[in-house]
Image (cartoon, rainbow, N blue to C red):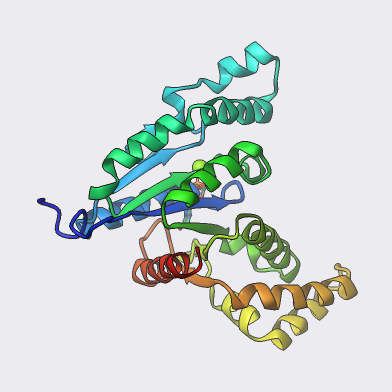
Amino acid sequence: DSSPSAGQAEGHQPTVIICIGMAGSGKTTFMQRINSHIHTLKKPGYVVNLDPAVGQLPFGANIDIRDTVNYKEVMKQYNLGPNGGILTALNLFTTKFDQVLNLIDKRAPTLDYVLLDTPGQIEIFTWSASGAIITDTLAATYPTVVAYIIDTPRSTSPATFMSNMLYACSILYKTKLPFVLVFNKTDVVSHEFAVEWMTDFEAFQAALEEDTSYMGGLVSSMCLVLEEFYKGIRVAGVSAVTGAGMDELFTAFDEARKEYETEY
Ligand code: GDP
Ligand code: MG
């Protein structure tokens, strides 16, 4: 075995990382960044693109949904709009997911990471049967981690921050998988404010009180829910563009994998 880190231990298994996040949060750019990072670490990875509508991929995908389904043809054939086309394309692809698993299984002993990019619009993956089937199927076989990508510059208001956290929280409880909150675009805005809000309840309350546009009472009760959520997750700040924060990120992935191994 020429690979230094993989394939040696009995039953070696790669870590599966599923990238989820709002449209424009930087999932695809982030995938490219972690793919090139593991390349420089000489750790072999396997890349799966699940976004049928991506124009150009900045990385070479080992498996690409676009090779199987053309979402524009699906739109025409089923008389759907873009989101319906993308969702139906994902559904059609998922009916063949056993083939995808077979391909991953064959390579698994020599891989350290399997990376999955998901469609731009978050709900297409998180609120569809296909997204659940893909997630559950992978998690039943491999240590699987969710990387929830956040657009940090667009989350600096307490209200948007909280909406994004509540969405992340709902995905955590839906998937029940180890979770890494990835604050992306730290080259534009540092994620320090977010870490402060997540660790200092009063600091977040104070920020909220300044935001008179929001329903204070509801938000205060939501804060209690989020406090519980924050206890169970890991945080990393990165820039997918500059590559800052990769060491902290991969430490978080390692810890998330350990959580999978002890809890699942
Ligand atoms: P996706 O829809 O979640 O896949 O997001 P993309 O990866 O397509 O990125 C959306 C936009 O955000 C693009 O214009 C990217 O160049 C930009 N972007 C992604 N990551 C970063 C980052 O770390 N820093 C900055 N400044 N821009 C980023
Ligand atoms: Mg994308």
Residue 230 x, y percent position in the rendering: 62, 75
- Nearest to the observer: residue 126 or residue 104: 104
* Residue 62 in view: no
In this picture, residue 157 sits left or right of residue 121: right
Residue drawn at 78 percent across, 77 percent down: 208
| Rendering coords of residue 193 (x, y %) | 59, 77
For residue 71, which quarter of the picture?
Answer: top right
Q: Is residue 38 left or right of residue 222?
A: left
Q: Quadrant of residue 58?
A: top left
Q: Which residue, as the protein is rendered here, is positioned at the far left?
A: 2
Foreground residue among 21 and 65:
65
Q: Residue at the spot x=32%, y=37% of the render?
A: 60
Q: Quick check: 223 left or right of 178?
A: right
Q: Residue at x 64, y 64 (%)?
A: 155
Q: Which residue appears at 87% of the width and 71% of the height?
A: 218
Q: Quadrant of residue 151?
A: bottom right
Residue 203 is situated, as x and y percent measured from the top left of the image, at 70, 86
Question: Is there any visible trace of residue 102 in the rendered image?
Answer: yes
Q: Is residue 247 above or below residue 209?
A: above
Residue 19, given in percent of the width and then of the height, sits at: 50, 51
Name the side, left or right, on which 215 lies relative to 162: right
Q: Residue furthest top?
A: 77
- Indicate whether 212 appears above or below 94: below
